[in-house]
Image (cartoon, grey):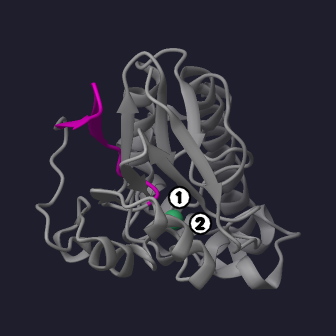
């Protein structure tokens, strides 16, 4: 077992829950440095990490990354070459040595196209925004996509009962269970979207995103309406592809 420390960044919000979780693995690898908050960065610099990793390109995970890497002379690596600094882009399936264990990079597109999880075998999986500590993740259309997200949930479910260390929220006990919950939630939402389209007399391919969002997410806070609409656009794009209706419960098919 390698020591994994969780440091909560001071950026709570509707999208970030309690704030971004920054993880330090074996005292030498920082995952998701988080926001560019001076005290948070100072705390990470004091650890003198040799490697900085990010789970995806969103600012609440990456804003402090380049500054941290530069200050301590560490490599910064991500799947997206544009997020890297002094280090190579990550490769799906790659093993990264840390202490006397190795982390495995698992590409898990869906929330964004560049989302990855880091697997610490027999111990835990760091999931970024692919699986959160509570609630569901946003599919950030057009970068994110529902079909890719379902495929990523299958990969995560296959990891079994590893502990989930999410990018936001508290750890969860089983990635397999969390992946199943997420699949059920997304499948139920897609059924609601299909029902809303029927009620509104619209087709997935040319629907009014705001109108369908208002129907499926009536109580959404104005501050995160953009996220609800991005997720809706992703779901409509998915449903507009005929073959994907197969994933819906049979009662929802016409
Ligand atoms: Zn994100």
The C terminus is located in which quarter?
top right
Q: Which quadrant: the N terminus? A: top left
Residue drawn at x 59%, y 26% as measured from the top left: 180
Q: Tell me if I can see residue 225 in this picture.
A: yes
Asked whether 85 or 110 is in front, the reply is 85
Give the main secondary structure of the magenta stretch: strand
Label 2 neighbourhood size at 10 Å, few (<14), some (14-19), many (20+)? many
Measured as percent of width and height from the top left, residue 194 is found at 64, 52
Please identify the quarter of the rendering in which residue 181 is found.
top right
Q: Nearer the viewer, residue 163 or 188?
A: 163
Residue at (71, 50) in percent of width and height = 169
- Residue that sits furthest to the right in the current view: 219
Secondary element at image label 1 = helix
Q: Which residue is mark 1?
A: 235
* Residue placed under numbered mark 2 in the picture: 232
Mark 1 neighbour class, 10 Å CA radius: few under 14, some 14 to 19, many 20 or more = many
Span colored in magenta: 95-111
On whether residue 238 falls in the magenta region, the answer is no
Rendered residue at 61%/22% (across/down) = 174
Task: Please say whether residue 37 is visible from this viewpoint.
Answer: no
Say what secondary structure mark 2 lies in.
Answer: helix
Marks 2 and 1: CB-CB under 8 Å? yes
Place of residue 248 in the rendered image (x, y in percent of width and height, measured from the top left): 56, 35
Residue 185's image quarter?
top right
Q: For this rendering, which residue is in front, 103 or 25?
A: 25
| In this rendering, position of residue 216 left or right of residue 183 | right
């Amino acid at each position: 077992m390698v020591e994994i420390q969780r440091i909560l960044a001071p950026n709570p919000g509707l999208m970030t829950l309690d704030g971004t979780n920054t993880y330090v693995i074996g005292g030498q690898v920082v995952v998701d440095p988080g926001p560019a908050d001076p005290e948070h960065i100072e705390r990470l610099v004091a650890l003198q990490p040799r490697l900085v990793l990010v789970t995806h390109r969103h600012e609440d995970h990456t804003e402090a990354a380049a500054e941290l890497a530069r200050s301590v002379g560490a490599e910064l690596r991500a799947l997206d070459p544009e997020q890297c600094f002094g280090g190579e882009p990550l490769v799906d399936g790659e093993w990264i040595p840390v202490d006397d264990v190795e982390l495995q990079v698992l590409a898990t597109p869906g929330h964004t196209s560049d989302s990855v999880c880091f697997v610490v075998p027999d111990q835990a999986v760091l999931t970024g925004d692919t699986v959160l500590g509570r609630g569901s993740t946003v599919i950030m259309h057009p970068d994110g996509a529902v079909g890719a997200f379902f495929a990523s949930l299958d990969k995560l479910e296959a990891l079994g009962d590893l502990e989930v260390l999410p990018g936001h929220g508290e750890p969860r006990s089983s990635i397999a269970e969390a992946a199943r919950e997420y699949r059920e939630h997304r499948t139920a939402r897609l059924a609601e979207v299909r029902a809303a389209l029927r009620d509104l007399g619209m087709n997935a391919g040319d629907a009014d995103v705001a109108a369908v969002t208002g129907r499926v997410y009536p109580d959404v806070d104005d501050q995160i309406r953009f996220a609800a609409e991005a997720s809706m656009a992703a779901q409509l794009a998915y449903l507009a592809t005929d073959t994907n209706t197969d994933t819906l419960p049979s009662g929802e098919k016409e």
